[in-house]
Image (cartoon, rainbow, N blue to C red):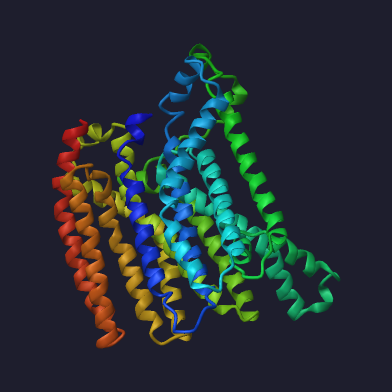
Amino acid sequence: MAPRDAHRLDLALIRAALILALSIALLTAKLPPGVTVFLGPLRFISGISLIFTLVLAARLGSDSVGDVRTGLLGLLQLAGTRPWQWLTVRTAQMWIGFLSVWIVRAPAIAYMYTLGGVRLETILLNEGVMLIVFFVASSLALLLSFGASSRRQVGSRLVLALFTWNVFLIMPFTIGSGIMSSWPNLMVPGLTEKLEWLAGFSLSAQFALATNATTTPAEQLPGIILYGSIGIVLSVWYWQLVRTCGTTTVEERGRPQPAAVRSGQRVSRRCWDDALAWQAFTHYSRGARLVKMKIIGYALLAYLSWIAFKLDYEVVAMIASPVLCGGLLMNAVNKPGECLTHEINEKTIGTLLLTPHEYQELAAGWRRGAWRLAAPDLVLWGVLTAASGLFHENAPPVMLCVGMVLIASQHFFILSPLMPFSFLGVTSGLGMIGVFIAVALICVLAAAYVHPWAGPAVLGPLLWGITLILKRAFPYWMEKKVASVV
């Protein structure tokens, strides 16, 4: 355990990013003289903290990726380690990592309390909800890591599961309210109130309730009990998986399987002529199924957005849709980095290099599969970019700039698994992040002082130049990584 948990650069970067985000939030918290009521910045800080809570939960919970595949759990059972002991160790590791990052919030929260207008009870409730969110999210990430093949897979599945749960609780009330406003005779009396009570247990509703100045502990207690119980169930579920893992001996695995078991096995998938694109799209992503799910999900999102427009919540729809689409788009276009990470972790990169392909050709093949995977996201992002002009005339260039950055991040993330934990590697990584920040500032200045559409016009050539440099740097870092693992 020590070698893997040592040198936690990821936690150090998350801690630094959280400090930076909180510092920016506190800069916006300066009040005019005589003004003491200030609940907005607390919600802003809590929103930032919620994002970092989910990132931490996914990162720490995914430390268990590979425990089954590498045979670690089997060795632990042979060593006499009980499942509850292993669960205790994993849980303690997650909470220690979480608290080591979470402690940096204490000065910011203390400063917010000194500004006045925020009750200590509200702050404590908000902190309690954050702890419960981490407990549930980390337990779910730990459970998902049992059969996952990469950290990124755990993160994407965690976000998808939480989003689905939130929609599952909110959607009945949203549909019921839409029917009530259009066809009130079709609704059962009292059903809307029950659906509203159910929607109150969603993550978004619980977050809004925790940051409300008038919320009492009695109002927050049902949600805390519900999500605390869910976290316990997820932990028990993981314990059950660990307990049953390794019960089949090596001799039993080698015996011929019954016909009923063989008939239930998945049929081997046919590889494309473009094998690298097939590997990125089908082998690592189950792309055909995922693309269908995206299309269905986006159609459902469009319907929910229409309901939100009918209820005068268009701002919520125009924020939630780009955030969801942008996250899925970034996950899809960064599939080449995930493929490279798989090859390195599985020690198959040496075999892959025996094929008559150069380093750039490997990356190009994975990108072709990634573009197929990102097709629904690109279409929706284009629709959202065009539709954003209906709300503000400067929104389309902003959406276009964000989309360009998401696509250009592909070349950054494919270099990420190649960077060593050394002075040169860390400096190069921070340098690339600094270049992206500088380009973003130049784009913002051009849009603010010249014209809103000057932002995309300036950003396009700059990103093209950056991606060209990153492409040229890819073979260099690839050779260094291959030399260290082959």
How many labels, in total? 0
Q: Is residue 147 among the parts visible in the rendering?
A: no
331, above or below 459, in the image: above
Q: Position of residue 200 (x, y in %)?
A: 69, 63
In depth, the one of 42 and 360 nearer the eye is 42
Residue drawn at x 41%, y 87% as measured from the top left: 393
| Vertical arrangement, residue 124 with respect to residue 481, above or below | below
Q: Residue at x 34, y 64 (%)?
A: 406
Foreground of the two, 403 or 263: 403
- Is residue 94 rendered to the left or right of residue 264? left
Residue at point 34%, 62% (across, down): 20
Residue sitting at the far right? 189
Q: Give the quarter of the figure containing the C terminus.
A: top left
Q: Quadrant of the N terminus?
A: top left
In the rendered image of this protein, does residue 445 appear above or below residue 109? Answer: below
Residue 271 is left or right of residue 249, and the answer is left
- Residue 459 lies in quadrant: bottom left
- Residue 211: tell me if it is visible: yes
**Which residue is at 49% across, 34% downward?**
90
Horizontal relation, residue 421 to residue 40: left or right: left
Residue 385 drawn at (x, y percent): 41, 76
Residue 47 is left or right of residue 197, and the answer is left
Residue 462, how many percent across, how many down? 19, 70
